[in-house]
Image: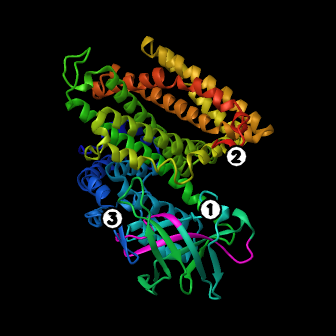
Amino acid sequence: MTDYRAPLNDIRFTWSHIADLPGLPGVDMEVLDAALEEAAKLAAEVLAPLNRTGDLEGATVENGVVRTPTGFKDAYAAYRDGGWNAVPFPEAYGGMELPVTFANVCGELWNSANMGFALCPLLNVGAVEAIYAHGSDEQKELYLPRMISGEWAGTMNLTEPQAGSDVGALTTRAEPAGDGTWRIKGTKIFISYGEHDFTDNIVHLVLARTPDSPSGTRGISLFIVPKFLPDTDGNPGQRNDLRCVSLEHKLGIHASPTAVMSYGDNDGAVGFMLGEENKGMRAMFTMMNNARLAVGVQGVAIAERAYQQAVAYALERKQGKPMAGDGETIVEHADVRRMLLTMKAHVDAMRAICMVNAEAIDRARRAEDADERARFAGLVELLTPISKSWCTDAGVEIASIGVQVHGGMGFIEETGAAQYLRDARIAPIYEGTNGIQAMDLVMRKLPLQGGQVVAGLFAEMRALDEPLAAAGAEFAATRASLTAAVDCVETTTATLLDQLSQEPNAAVAGCTPYLRMMGLVVGGWLLARGALRANQMLAAGEGDAGFLKGRIVAARFFAEQVMPQVAGLAPAATAGDELLYAIPAERLSA
């Protein structure tokens, strides 16, 4: 396993020349640059060295007590004491109130270095956002300063054994205690960091049903259920009636304790309602929407780490005689170059999508003009399922290519390449499977504002045509590929919207290939935008010429050799559902 090095040049280029972080109101780029350097040190020097040992040791549980792998507790202390947990949160509760864009950049570094570790702070962000958005003043004053500082950690308890992604099928109960509190009884599964040894207290946000609540999602409420009930001074007091029953044995992210949590084995776990009764789904989506972009960033992070290791291996591995080039290592083989450039171009595109998505969140919150805030809020809605799904699917693909670059050694655990593939595989599943994200994109996001949100995105893409034409012959193929891809996806979008109004299941049948089309087009468009800027910088003699040329080449590769997949996906996106049901369910196994 190679050492991790934060890709600072690519991050800075993306946030300055594809996104526009310097143009965000209230941003001091000198502060962010300095903070980025420090974040890179923590990732490379503290978190990354624990990645392999965390995978080998895993988290363990005995009598309900969870121990994280060697060094993890100290690493969390370094993370907490450095103030990193407070980056995006309001100053009123001890946060730094730095841009969400910067917080997501930090998230990339933590996850590239050590995804098993990074899941703990990732989920805490969603819990903080939910309490901030829906909590009472008393709840905010009690919980937010401690969760923002990292003194306490938060979790999300949504899934149950019989329910899976169908949240409306949950059966956990909440009974009123007569004193304003509730008694929670039920079992939750797949709870990342549901129990651990990082913090003095763990604040669980638990979905449950109150008596006589409506069936389905309409009857769900959300509760704050702390591991230790805070005393009058706000310190951890009496142990609550909840426990970790077991930890899941998983394909990857072994260092992250994925807990089965039992609430109310005795008198019932004491819970405090968060928000209004039967309005838990609203609060849940506050957590989920935050987490979905963060999971998309995990896809970027794992792909980056896999790419770094693949390049390092290709530069040193001697095998065969290349047909071109002067070197003796496999990096000179054409097919290895194809794999490495495929990896690089995808990582660049994935990072661009997630960063533009995060910047849209910042502008939706910070813009002075209400119409501008609304416009960016719509863009956030549209991009979030693409960020989550396309970037996590691509993360798995890129990690798999990384194994392939290593050849047989990639299949051997000692190299570390296999761990990235195993760790990456969870990301397309949790926080809403990628199929659910694709349905959300087609059924809810395309019709936003009568289709004007997606139409506005296509118009913005087409606005790049004139600058590409002016850039000359070097960008001619990129221009042609982008134009063809936008034409194709725009036509496909119209077809799906028509199907949605007449045969919804026909539209749903094509949503996954459609989301992939959108990821490819948005990624290619953003890379082309960055390549144009790199070309301008080269002409002006600005920046590192080698780095800028690499950005242009990667963008061209993506446009010319990856984006043509868009046309091939269109028939599947618009084919409808007839063939999917042509074989009776009982005959699928025959």
- Disc 3 residue type (three-letter): Arg
Residue tagged by mark 3?
80
Q: Nearer the viewer, residue 31 or 146?
A: 146
Q: Residue at x 64, y 46 (%)?
A: 440
Q: Position of residue 103 (x, y in %)?
A: 41, 52
Q: Residue at x 21, y 31 (%)?
A: 317
- Give the colour scheme of this rendering: rainbow
On residue 263, the disc is none
Q: Position of residue 307 (x, y in %)?
A: 33, 37
**Separation of residues labelled 2 and 1 (CA atoms):** 23 Å
SS type, badge 3: helix
SS type, badge 2: helix
Does the magenta segment cover residue 196? yes
Asked whether residue 377 is in view, the answer is: no
Q: Is residue 161 left or right of residue 316?
A: right
Q: Which residues are magenta?
A: 189-213
Q: In this rendering, is residue 134 above or below 229? A: above
